[in-house]
Image: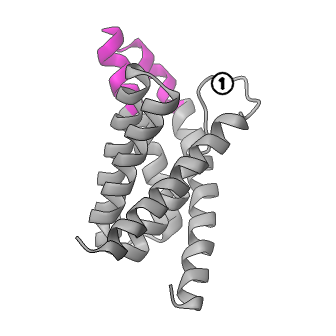
């Protein structure tokens, strides 16, 4: 791997980590616990569209690991990793079809992220009762996916315009 690639991976990982920190410091005042916009996914989607799936996977997984080590715990890692992996797989597959816009890929990715986390919760808590929370998470995942998708789309277009 050349120096330019390593530098790019590090830069995008750092940006995604900063977005994670911003998200933690700016909690959304909703009566529903655990809801986040998913600001780091703006960076992940940008990387997916501009640099490809391998780079997006590397940046996302390193970000999840580092953020969990620095600011979280083992359970946080399990939830974050499940959401990130499922979300990435779905977004990569949808992007490959060319049937979905950045916005569509983001929305389905947001919902998949929540589904991954609910799956881990059901396993860790040994109950499927928590899955009743999924309709709420589908709605919030859709809204968050729209916000992330619009921001990612604007960032991608700006990067294309300046030749990045």
Residue 127 place in picture, x, y as percent = 34, 10
The structure residue drawn at horizontal position 57% and vertical position 72%, both measured from the top left corner, is 153
Residue 136 lies left or right of residue 109; in this view the side is: right
136 falls in the magenta region: no
Q: Measured along the vertical axis of the image, is residue 132 above or below residue 36?
A: above
How many marks on residues? 1
- In the figure, residue 5 lies in which quadrant? bottom left
Nearer the observer, 70 or 104:
70
Tag 1 secondary structure: loop
- Magenta span includes 120: yes
Nearest the eye: 109 or 164? 164
Left or right: where 18 falls relative to 106: right
Colour scheme in use:
one colour
**What residue is at 35 percent from the left and 68 percent from the top?**
95
Q: Which residues are magenta?
A: 117-135
Is residue 127 in view?
A: no
Q: Is residue 40 visible?
A: yes
Q: Is residue 63 above or below residue 148?
A: above
Extreme-front residue of the structure = 3
User: Residue 133: x, y in percent?
Assistant: 51, 23
Q: Quadrant of residue 117?
A: top left
Q: Residue at x 61, y 38 (%)?
A: 36
Q: Up-down: is 158 above or below 116?
A: below
Q: Residue at x 55, y 57 (%)?
A: 15
Locate residue 126 relative to residue 46 in the image: left or right.
left
**x and y percentages locating residue 85 in the rendered image:** 31, 44
The secondary structure making up most of the magenta span is: helix
- In the visual, does 143 lie left or right of 64? right
Question: Residue 71 location in percent, x, y?
Answer: 53, 29
Residue under label 1: 32
């Amino acid at each position: 791997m050349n120096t330019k690639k390593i530098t790019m991976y590090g830069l995008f990982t750092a940006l995604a980590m900063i977005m994670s920190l911003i998200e933690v410091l700016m909690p959304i005042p909703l009566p529903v616990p655990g809801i986040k916009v998913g600001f780091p996914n703006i960076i992940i989607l940008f990387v997916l569209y501009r640099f490809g799936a391998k780079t997006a996977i590397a940046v996302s997984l390193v970000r999840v690991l580092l953020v969990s080590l620095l600011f979280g715990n083992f359970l946080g890692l399990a939830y974050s990793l499940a959401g990130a992996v499922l979300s990435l797989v779905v977004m990569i597959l949808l992007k490959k079809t060319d049937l979905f816009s950045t916005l569509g890929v983001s929305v389905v990715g947001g919902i998949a992220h929540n589904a991954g986390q609910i799956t881990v919760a059901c396993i860790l808590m040994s109950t499927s009762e928590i899955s009743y929370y999924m309709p709420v998470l589908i709605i919030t995942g859709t809204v968050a996916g729209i916000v992330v998708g619009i921001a990612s789309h604007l960032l991608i277009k700006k990067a294309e315009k300046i030749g990045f």
